[in-house]
């Protein structure tokens, strides 16, 4: 027996739920004016609450989107944008009950994966989530950042007023497209929730190339000057940077590194983004941190395997074991031509957490096997599995949710 009930929210319970989540994450409480502006983007739909009587003591929220997978396709996905428990009711099974209810609901909706950003890295593995994409934190010293003569020149960059940015950015993001595994579609709900405030608080710059607008960045200045270091200048924090091609990417970086009175530019970027190689002094681009960015939990293994592309290698049979969503369990034959269920003997056995780590190409099966995350039933399957799941681009989401 539990002393709480798990159910979907009813209309009228959204604000109390949002305030409970804010308390769990130590966020300031919204004013009535702020809530009125944002309430339409926090609907009761897809939000599970844990209730003790009429009081909400925990919540799990998600919204529907699409996730880009290797090969260029996108699959229906649940973006989990809030899971929290009231501080006085933690460690009593509330989060577990919420997560299980949410995962089953998302699977019933036909979503292929669930996707989240973890506030704590020790929580979500037990629900089948694995680190699916990582990012690097870059710090570039502008005093030493000079582009090589053979680096792409880029196009032109213009600044937008907030009203212009609100109108232009959704269509520009769609035009840039989900060109990298791990990227998600930005729904109308996403644009109406946190991004209006972000646009208002940041400077928006748009890059234009031969075919028109093809990239943008939102950045915010941070004054590093002190009484002891008046020469320190400003650091630009690049919070949201997307480009359709290398020319647009370089053009945006040229702009950021050329802004007057700026000593550093800081950004979270894909692991394989080659900004340092474009500079005469690669050490001017310093990687200060490497960390997990997004976590993935498969909800429909056959659909997930069928959606992505594979490298050239001999077929491999993988046995998937899912303690929560039993329909996923079984053996799957994976080849360059795709994936299908099979009764053939398996070469590898794994669960949802390991699958989340290798599905988008972030980690190789052989590494996970060496770490004990994948069980090897036939050693010959490992090198073939590495080639099958290898991707030309490292996965990266680039969208906060």
Image (tube, rainbow, N blue to C red):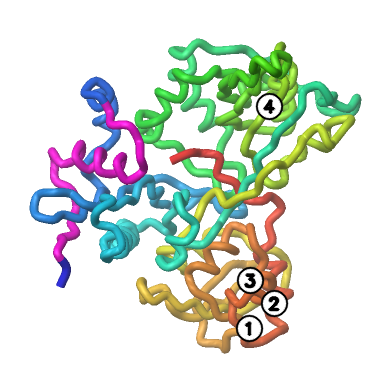
In contact (CB < 8 Å): disc 3 and disc 1: no
The residue beneath circle 3 is: 368
- Please say if the residues under marks 1 and 2 sit with CB atoms less than 8 Å apart: yes
* Residue matched to label 2: 382
Whether residue 99 is visible to the viewer of this picture, yes or no, is: yes
Q: Separation of disc 4 and disc 2 at Cα? A: 41 Å
Secondary structure of the residue carrying tag 1 is strand
Q: Which residue is mark 1?
A: 376
Kindly report the distance in space between the C-alpha atoms of the residues bearing marks 3 and 4: 35 Å
In primary-sequence order, the first of circles 3 and 4 is 4
Q: Which residue sits at x=73%, y=33%?
A: 246
- Please provide the residue range marked out in magenta: 3-30
Left/right of residue 279 with respect to residue 320 in the rendered view: right
User: x%, y% of residue 168?
Assistant: 49, 19
Marks 3, 1: nearer the viewer: 3
Mark drawn on residue 265? 4
Gap between marks 2 and 3, in whole Å?
A: 10 Å
């Amino acid at each position: 027996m539990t002393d709480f009930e798990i159910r979907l929210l009813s209309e009228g319970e959204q604000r109390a739920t949002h305030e409970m989540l804010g308390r769990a994450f130590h966020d300031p409480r919204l004013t009535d004016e702020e809530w009125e502006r944002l309430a339409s983007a926090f609907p009761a739909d897809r939000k599970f609450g844990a209730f003790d009587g009429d009081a909400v003591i925990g919540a799990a929220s998600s919204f529907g989107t699409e996730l880009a997978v290797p090969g260029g396709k996108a699959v229906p996905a649940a973006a989990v944008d809030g899971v929290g428990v009231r501080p006085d009711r933690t460690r009593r099974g509330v989060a577990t009950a919420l997560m299980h209810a949410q995962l089953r609901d998302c699977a019933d909706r036909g979503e292929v994966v669930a996707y989240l950003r973890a506030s704590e890295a020790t929580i979500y593995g037990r629900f089948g989530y694995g680190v699916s994409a990582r990012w690097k934190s870059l710090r570039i010293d502008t005093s030493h950042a000079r582009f090589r003569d053979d680096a792409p020149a880029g196009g032109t960059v213009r600044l937008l007023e907030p009203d212009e940015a609100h109108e232009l950015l959704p269509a520009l993001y769609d035009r840039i497209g989900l060109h990298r595994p791990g990227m998600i579609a930005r729904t109308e709900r996403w644009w109406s929730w946190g991004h209006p405030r972000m646009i208002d608080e940041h400077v928006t710059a748009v890059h234009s190339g031969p075919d028109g607008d093809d990239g943008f960045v939102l950045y915010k200045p941070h004054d590093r000057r002190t009484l002891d270091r008046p020469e320190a200048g400003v650091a630009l924090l690049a919070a949201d940077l997307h480009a359709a091609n290398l020319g647009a990417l370089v053009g945006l970086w040229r702009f950021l590194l050329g802004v007057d009175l700026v000593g550093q530019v800081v950004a979270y970027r894909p692991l394989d983004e080659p900004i340092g190689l474009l500079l005469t002094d690669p050490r001017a681009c310093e990687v200060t941190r490497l960390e997990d960015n997004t976590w993935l939990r498969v909800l429909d293994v056959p659909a997930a395997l069928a959606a992505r592309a594979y490298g050239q290698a001999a077929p491999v049979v993988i046995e998937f074991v899912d303690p929560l969503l039993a329909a996923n369990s079984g053996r799957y034959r994976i080849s360059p031509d795709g994936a299908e269920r099979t009764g053939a003997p398996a070469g590898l056995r794994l669960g949802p957490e390991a699958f989340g780590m290798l599905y988008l190409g972030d980690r190789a099966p052989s590494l996970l096997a060496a770490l004990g995350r994948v069980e090897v039933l036939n050693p010959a399957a490992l090198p073939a599995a590495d080639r099958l799941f290898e991707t030309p681009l490292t996965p990266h989401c680039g969208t906060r949710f």
